Image (cartoon, rainbow, N blue to C red):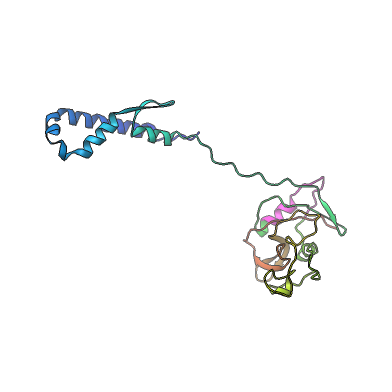
Amino acid sequence: MFQWKGAPFFGGALGCLLRLLTITVCSNYSHYMKNYTRYPLLIVLFLLLLVPVYTQGQGSVSLIMAPILAAVNDDTEPNPPLPPPPILDPVEWQGRIWQQNDDGNRYNWYDAIHYCDTLDLNGYSDWMLPSKDELKSLVVCTNGTPTPLPDCHADGCVCGDQIDDPYKGFESPTIDKAFTCRPDNYWTSSPNPADDARRVNFERGGAAAYERSAEYYVRCVRPQ
């Protein structure tokens, strides 16, 4: 439960202000009553501070203090984050053992390499981040576009353009049904001369280089 450490001080200060206001008004009662039209805001504030209301667990507090105390002692918990998807058993694909799905987290390139190097899954601890060509070997284009695809950003380097011809009507994510995959980017271990690294996009099947600080998903593979 959230507890505001400054609540006792705030409450004490407000109590002192209330006492001071009470003494001031009472000592000049006749003056305020004769000139009440000049002090409407002061009188309303004074009455609100004095009128008690009951709130559960707080006892009798004023109309002004009630919402303040309710906010300070609000024990409503935020919605918990969704748990990551379970890591399923590895899949054998074209003679290689692959991680069946990702762990639901995004990593920069350096952390992606570390994740695979330290992964212990299904009794295996020799996992590694796949190279560009290894990860591209998982791409499947259901519209008949031949694979493996070349490395570029043009329409001819992906399974197809979802808007224009000549390629249209492929399924996304562009991967075999044996895998659980997101239509998103996955890191490879292949560096790029411009201090970038290669990633494979399983929304359309293309591969390209991006800065190593970018955060993408990871699918590990065991060595041959």
* x then y, percent, for residue 202: 72, 62
Pinpoint residue 117: horizontal percent, then vertical percent: 74, 53
On screen, 8 above or below 168? Answer: above
Q: Residue 49 location in percent, x, y?
A: 29, 32
Q: At 78% across and 54% down in the image, what residue appears? A: 179
Q: Residue at x 73, y 60 (%)?
A: 173
9 w.r.t. 85: above or below: above
Q: As displayed, is residue 82 above or below residue 74? A: below
Per the rendered image, the range of residues in magenta is: 111-127
Image quarter of residue 130: bottom right
Assess whether residue 120 is covered by the magenta stretch: yes
Q: Is residue 76 left or right of residue 168?
A: left
Residue at the spot x=74%, y=50% of the render?
118
Q: Is residue 125 above or below residue 27?
A: below
Residue 21 part of the magenta-drawn span:
no
Q: Quadrant of residue 80?
A: top right
Name the side, left or right, on which 161 lies relative to 177.
left
* Quarter occupied by the C terminus: bottom right
Q: Identify which residue, 124 or 42, lies in the foreground.
A: 42
Q: Is residue 181 shown left or right of residue 60?
A: right
| Residue 71 percent coordinates (x, y) | 42, 37
Q: Exactly how many numbered labels are in the figure?
A: 0
Q: Determine which quarter of the picture holds residue 203.
A: bottom right
Relative to the observer, which residue lies in front, 74 or 97?
74
Q: Residue furthest right?
A: 95
